[in-house]
Amino acid sequence: MSFTTDVKAEIANANLDIGPMRAQAAALIQLCSYLSFSSAGIQLHIKTENAATAKRIFKVLKELYNVPTELSVIRKMKLKKNNIYSLNVVSKGKEVLEDLGLISEKGLQSHPARSLVAKESGARAYLSGAFLAAGSVNSPQKSNYHLEIATQDEEHAKFIEKLMRRFDLPAKTILRRNQYVVYLKASDKISDFLRLCSANNAVLDFEEIRIERDFHNSLTRLDNCEVANEMKSQEAARKQLEAIDKLRSHNRLDALELKLKEIAELRIDFPEASLNELCEEYEKRTGSIMSKSGMKHRFTKIMEIAERIV
């Protein structure tokens, strides 16, 4: 199973009080259903490819409204051949929509009744329902962190984004293939969203894998940095030795002032040593402390003298 499937299964099993359950039902119906009209009134037709989402919708409709629901399963024959779970609410459709504030005298609304999401518990439940209905999240094992909720309506996308920002989740919205996608990219904010939806086991899995990946990446960057520094150190040592050889071939090495000659001899004796290592050797030989910048300055002087030799 995918990480998204695991997250949705956990969210679908969370217990909610009646108030938050209504908020979650509003999100599920908004994002999973379409309407039809008959002599019996408004009928709700709900479709989803996620089994946990289908069970959750069936449960909340039963507990909240005790409406008769027809459930069917269709097997897709193309692409991934997933099951499509279809729930038809053949009566009380209008009553359900009115109770959730999804329909009024002006027609269908882009958001539920404000009272449903006024409290934190209701807002959290609505976002969890939105994710159940139309959300996805990349596995933390992937190189890019990404969580999104897709909707057909721009105003609805803005509503979801605003709800997320109430919880310090910096969501953004883009238009992708005729859908408005509300998304998060930062790994810590994705973790916060999963926690907000009561997907606590998923949070633990997400954080464990994320920390392991980030730690591995940090080690890799550190190793690369150390290799780069070592290469720079070796290149500097090579140029210093070339300058010293040039001075020696022109009988100018012994003519250097003592403080420069000491450094030149130190490099000859330790051709692969770093500046820090040369400073330690210098202290052993002379009993005097030499800083790294002081060592580098003296090598610069030696190389300048060598460059002046034609």
Image: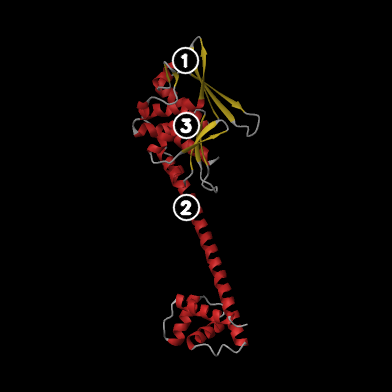
Give coordinates of residue 157: x percent, y percent. 47, 31
Residue 291 higher or lower than 175, as above or below: below
Residue denoted by label 2: 211
**Which of disc 1 and disc 2 is earlier in sequence?**
1
Give coordinates of residue 123: x percent, y percent. 38, 33
* Numbered badge on residue 91: 1
Residue 58 higher or lower than 240, as above or below: above
Residue at the spot 51% in from the left edge and 42% down from the top edge: 146
Front one among 2 and 280:
280
Labelled pair 2, 1 in contact (Cβ < 8 Å): no
Splitting the image into 4 quarters, where does residue 12 fall? top left
Residue denoted by label 3: 157
Q: Secondary structure at mark 1?
A: loop
* Numbered badge on residue 289: none
Q: Residues under labels 2 and 3: Cα distance?
A: 31 Å
**Disc 2 residue type (three-letter):** Ile
Q: Label 3 crowding class (10 Å Cα cut-off): few <14, some 14-19, many 20+?
A: many
**Disc 3 residue type (three-letter):** Ala
Q: How is the image coloured?
A: secondary structure
Give coordinates of residue 174: x percent, y percent. 51, 36
Residue at the spot 63% in from the left edge and 32% down from the top edge: 81
**Which of disc 3 and disc 2 is earlier in sequence?**
3
Q: Residues under labels 2 and 1: Cα distance?
A: 50 Å
**Disc 1 residue type (three-letter):** Ser
